[in-house]
Amino acid sequence: MSTTLSISELNEMKHAPAGLLPAISKRWSPRSFSDRDVSPADLAKVFEAARWAPSSSNGQPWTYIVGLRNSETHKKIASTLVGFNQAWAPLASVLILGLANTKFAKDGKLNTYAFFDLGAATGFLVLQATALGIATHQMAGYDHDAIRKILEIPEDYALGSVMALGYQDEPAKLPNPKLIEMETSARNRKPLSEFVLSAFGQPLNLG
Amino acid sequence: MSTTLSISELNEMKHAPAGLLPAISKRWSPRSFSDRDVSPADLAKVFEAARWAPSSSNGQPWTYIVGLRNSETHKKIASTLVGFNQAWAPLASVLILGLANTKFAKDGKLNTYAFFDLGAATGFLVLQATALGIATHQMAGYDHDAIRKILEIPEDYALGSVMALGYQDEPAKLPNPKLIEMETSARNRKPLSEFVLSAFGQPLNLG
C-alpha cells in the first residue's frame, strides 16, 4: 500500500472530536519522523511540563534518559527496540526512556504510585510537545532486560515507555507498506459509557 | 493561620513558569472546593480528554467510578478518605476513583503498562478540567481495602487515585488553619538537572 496523503491531511483525519484542549485533540502517535532535530530550548520546555505534573506526596518519581540523535544513548535505546519499532523509531530526533523511582527519595519507603505518576508526567510531556508542533510516539515494545543492562538502570527504577520524539514527516516516507498502512489507519477508542461509571459495571448518565 | 488571599491572588502565586501550555502552568491541587456543581456537559468533556490518551497496544485500560454530590457513590468514596483528606475532599462536587484493568480486554493477558496508562489518561483529564476552569486534587490517602469492598472492585483492577473535582473556593473557606497553611504554601519541584539525564546519574546538557 502506498499513500498520497500529506501530513496535514493525515493529521486532519486523526484529529479527535472538537471542543477539547487543542493539544489533546491534535495529539496522536505517528511513526514517520523527519531528520529535523528538536532544539534544546524546545526540549527543555517539554521536560518543564513534566516537572509540574502532580504526584503522590509530591514525590516526583519520574526520571528521563534522553538520547539525542547520533549520541551513544540514542544508539543504545534504538538497539533495544523490537519488531516494527526497529524500522521507524530510530529515525526520530530524540529517543527517551522514562523511569519511575519506586522508592520515595525522602525516606526510601515504597512508592506504590510511582508508575502512575510517571504516566501522568509523561502525559503532560506529550501534550506540551504537541503544543510546540512536536510529535511523540511511545512504545512498550523494547527489550526491557537489555535496556536495563545497557543503560545501567538500578533495580529500584521501574521501566516506563520508550518515546520517539521529533518532527513528523510524510507517511509516504515510511520504509515499508505495512507501516504506511498503520500510519494511515483510523483511530479507535471505547465509548465513554464503557469506562465512565456511576458504580462498577454501570455507566454514568452524562445527560 | 488565616489568610486574606483571594482565589486569583493564590492562583497567581501557584502559577508555574510562563511559556508552557496554559493548562499546565495553571494547574495545581487546591483543597478549597465550592458548592457549585460541575455540569454533565463539562464532565463529559473531561472524560472525553482521557479517552484520547495513548495506551500500550491501545488497551485503554482506564475506568473511572464517578460520584456526583449527594449520590451514594460520592458518599462511599468520601467514607474511605483518611487524615486531612476527610476534612476537605468531601466538599468537592465530584469524587472520582480511577481504576486500571491489569488484563488486556482482547485476550486477558497481563497489561504491565495499565497503571502507567491510567496515570497518563488522568493527566489528560486534569488538564482538560483546568482548561474548563475546573480544579482537581488527586489523593492516594484513602483506605484501599475499604474502597475496593464498598465499590465492589474486581481484583484485576488496580486502584489509582481518588480525585476531588469541582470549582475552587477561597482559601479562607477551608475548615481549619492547617489546611489554609497547606493551601497557601509555595510549590516545590526538583530542577530539570535531577531528572532529565543523558545517561543514568548524568544531567542532560540543555544549554
Image: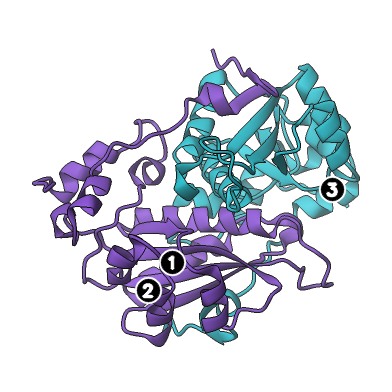
Chain colours: A purple, B cyan
Please, is residue A140 above or below residue B103 in the view? below
**Could you tell me the amino acid type at mark 1?**
Lys
Judging by the rendered image, the residue that carries numbered circle 3 is B179
Q: Chain of mark 1?
A: A
User: Residue farthest to the top?
Assistant: A207
Between the C-alphas of marks 3 and 1, the distance is 32 Å
Name of the residue lying farthest toward the left: A4
Label 3 vs label 2, nearer the camera: 2
Q: Amino acid at mark 3?
A: Leu
Q: Is residue B19 above or below residue B78?
A: below
Residue B2 in sight in this render: no
Instruction: Name the amino acid type tagged 2.
Output: Ala
In depth, the one of B68 and B16 nearer the eye is: B68
Q: State the image coordinates of residue A26 (x, y, percent, origin top left).
A: 33, 44
Q: Chain of mark 3?
A: B
Q: Chain of mark 2?
A: A
Q: Which residue is mark 2?
A: A41
Residue B31 visible: yes
Q: Residues within 10 Å of mark 3 (few under 14, many from 20)?
A: many
Q: Compared with residue A168, is residue B56 higher up or lower down, i.e. above or below?
A: above
